[in-house]
Amino acid sequence: MRRNEFEITEKAKIEKLLNDSSFCTLSFVDFNNKPYATTVNFVYHNKHIYFHSANSGKKIDIIKTKPLVYFTTFKAYSQIPSYFKSEDIACFAGQLFASIHAIGVVNIIKNDDLKSQILMALMNKFQPEGGFEPIYPNNLYKEMLDKVLVLEIDINSISAKFRFNQRESYENKSNLLKNLKKRGKKIDLETIKFIQENDLY
């Protein structure tokens, strides 16, 4: 990562963002050495990244021949206008964000017990209120388990980038917090909380 001041290496912060993020982009190199990317929901479970898919399609054909993948997920926070810093001079205007980047190898899970466990983890992430029968490799879910693929990303390397103007002076970062609080949108309050929780000021 070129801008080291934005790099986050703490494992707990990386894992929390993985657990808080709903979707990711998976990037591959296809059969013709051309880039191919797809966006999927995912769950981080037992130090691996998992997602599910239909049994066939371009993504699966690529994975079966070229399983190396680049994983990206992010969470967008407040947009920052230039007038937060200067009343009339065009200066930094952009989006504060936290992102994770990982490289790994995709494996297709064959074991029905593990497939059931991962599908339960996905359901619990996206439907934590319940309202469904637990997933086990029994008659109720046998047909579904046969039709769905569960895929695991075995992570080789992972890094995080939190861009919250860390390189600015303490005074400028304090003013940013004041401006966010004054504007007071829901996303601004979330941004303030994230900055404070992660000591980014």
Image: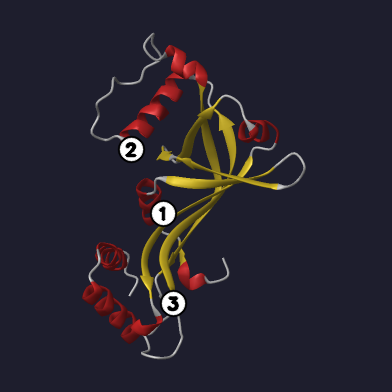
**Dot 1 surroundings within 10 Å: few (below 14), some, or many (20 or more)?**
many
Residue extending farthest top: 139
Query: Would you call the spot at circle 2 few (<14 residues within 10 Å), some (14-19), or many (20 or more)?
Result: some
| Quadrant, the N terminus | bottom right
In the image shown, does 107 or 92 lie closer to the viewer? 92
User: Label 1 to label 3, Cα distance in Å?
Assistant: 26 Å
Residue under the point 53% across and 39% down:
153
Tell me the element at label 1. helix
**Nearest the eye: 97 or 157:** 97
- How far is the residue under mark 2 from the one under mark 3? 34 Å
Residue 74, quarter of the rendered image: bottom left
Give the residue type at disc 1.
Answer: Ile
Where residue 125 appears, as percent x and y from the top left, is: 33, 38
Residue receiving disc 3: 93
What amino acid is labelled 2 in the image?
Answer: Lys
- Name the spot of residue 59 as percent of width and height, x first: 62, 35
Q: Which one is nearer the viewer's eye here, 44 or 186?
A: 186
Give SS at disc 2.
helix
| Above/below status of 93 relative to 85 | above
Identify the mark at residue 125; answer none if there is no mark: 2
Q: Earlier in the sequence, mark 2 or mark 1?
A: 1
Numbered label attached to residue 14: 1
Query: Is label 2 or label 3 in front?
Result: 3
Q: 28 and 45: which one is in front?
A: 28
Q: Is residue 40 left or right of residue 67?
A: left
Q: Is residue 51 left or right of residue 193?
A: right
- Seen as rendered, the residue at the extreme front is 88
Q: Residues within 10 Å of mark 3 (few under 14, many from 20)?
A: few
